Amino acid sequence: MNTEKPIKKDEYHEVEIEGLGHEGEGVGRVNDFTVFVPYALPGDRVKAKIIKVKNTYSYARIVNIIEPSKYRIDPACTVFFKCGGCQLQHLDYAQQLVLKRQLVIDNLERIGKFDNIKVNKTIGMETPMRYRNKMQLPVGNSRTGSINIGFYAHKTHDIIETDTCYIQPHINEEIIRIIRQWMEEKKITAYDEQTGKGLIRHIYTRIGFKTEEIMVVLVTNRRKIPNIKDLINTLTKINKNIVSIVQNINLEKSNVILGKENILLWGKDTITDFIGDIKFNISPISFYQINPLQTEILYNKVTEYAQLTGEETVFDLYCGIGTISLFLAQKAKKVIGVEIIPQAITDAKHNAKINNINNVEFYAGAVEETIPHLYKKGYMADVVVVDPPRKGCDEELLKTIIDMKVGRIVYVSCNPSTLARDLRILADNSYQIKEIQPVDMFPHTSHVECVVLITRVKD
Ligand code: SAH
């Protein structure tokens, strides 16, 4: 067999970039062989150096841009090309929305073998900046020994220092500045991943966008924090919305950010926020959607597609802390939420209680086991909402939904390729894919979220 590849490592090639890959990298072809080029954009013509050749694809690095895409812009962020947080800040925002929709269509065609599904224009943000309600910043030491606070560079644990992150609210810059100053003045040490020594590991904040409440969490490598009173005094003075300061102790030598123990240092142990009219109490460990403005748009779309009259039983599967369940409960007869993480189900029950919502039931368990079990016991749904993780729905679950002859399915997806795979299974089993609505939950990153309306066509 001829294993000779059409391109080789270290060669230079001119590449026309034709599409975007899953991680926001440019995709082109050289000698009919796929080349992924990070930071290249569709419409760019670049000179690229091949750095890695695999069996069916290769990776290359831009040497220079011969002709830029007409949508290429200067990124607002000065560390964009080093930081791993965003992938598309160098692409005009309107065009990001166009390409995210195209990514969905490409997956439907390539993986799902669909050719004429209605895919609406991506719903973007009016102001696609400062949208995140959660920040997790590593703290470390620079080579010269100064304190480093920033974001990890792409696929590494090198901390890229930055004062401004454009997708984070401004207040975080102030909080970082104060913590840095306190550490310098009081000689508080930063954690060193290599040696496992040093006190402050991460600065973590959560913000309620509707209530404006702020929680500041210091993740530490020991229990005792010297001079913590000074930090609390300064933080609470600069902004009255800082209502909660928590210490999280993480003694593990691992990549996991939060440890098991939370100690309340000042104020309340949770902050409150709302999505629509539904209230949530958020602790350091609670799962909560990251972009609350777009979440509301996403859930409104789910509600629209669910077409509830008040008579329906709804299953909300992969329900997390029950956000969609509680949203829909207002319009349904009954909602049953299922989620694998027991703590999330405890939170979901608590959230139902604080909102006085009584027509919901929550079960902790894997949906592929719980739903067949409930079905055997006689439970039925008129509408099923699924919101699975990136790997998509378990086949056993899809099989049960098909057996139950559920009339309407609303599929919320964060991964167009597994979505396309699952939609093919449903389409082959009496379901029609009516409409797909992409929603941009994470501007400037390569993520695409979709809501899909699926209806049953025959018995
Ligand atoms: N619908 C929620 C959360 C969706 S995230 C919201 O909008 O906020 C996907 C969720 O699926 C996660 O909470 C994850 O813990 C859960 N999950 C993953 N695999 C699962 C499984 N096999 N069964 C049930 N839940 C699962």
Image: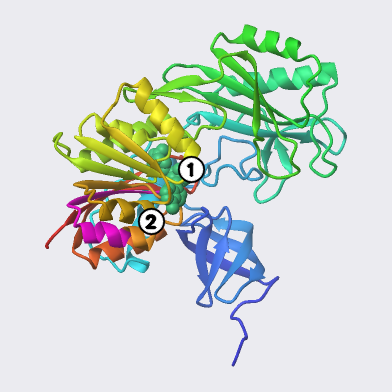
Quickly name the residue at label 1.
341
Left or right: 139 with respect to 117? right
Residue 407 located within the stretch drawn in magenta: yes
Per the image, the residue denoted by label 2 is 368
Measured as percent of width and height from the top left, residue 432 is found at: 19, 59
Identify the residue shown where x is 53% and y is 77%.
31
Q: Quadrant of ligand 1?
A: top left
| Label 2 C-beta lies within 8 Å of the nearest ligand 1 atom | yes
**Mark 2 touching mark 1, by CB under 8 A?**
no
Picture disc at residue 157: none
Residue 114, given in percent of the width and then of the height, sits at 27, 66
Judged left or right of residue 272, residue 299 is: left
Left or right, 423 with respect to 237, comes to left
Mark 1: give few (<14), some (14-19) or many (20+) Cα within 10 Å: some
Is 320 situated above or below 52? above
Q: Amino acid at mark 2?
A: Glu
Query: Which residue: 68% across, 42% down?
Result: 152
| Magenta residues, start to end | 398-413
Residue extending furthest toward the left: 458
- 312 in magenta: no
**Quadrant for the C terminus in the image:** bottom left
Q: Looking at the picture, does residue 147 appear above or below residue 96?
A: above
Q: Nearer the viewer, residue 372 or 452?
A: 372
Query: Cβ of disc 1 within 8 Å of ligand 1?
Result: yes
Q: Rounded to the nearest whole Å, what is the CA distance between mark 2 and mark 1? A: 14 Å
**Coloration of the structure image:** rainbow
Looking at the image, the residue that sits furthest to the bottom is: 1
The residue under label 1 is which amino acid type? Ile
- Alpha-carbon neighbours of circle 2 within 10 Å: few (<14), some, or many (≥20)? some
Quadrant location of the N terminus? bottom right
Q: Secondary structure at mark 1?
A: loop
* Residue 321 in the image, given as x and y percentages of width and height: 42, 35
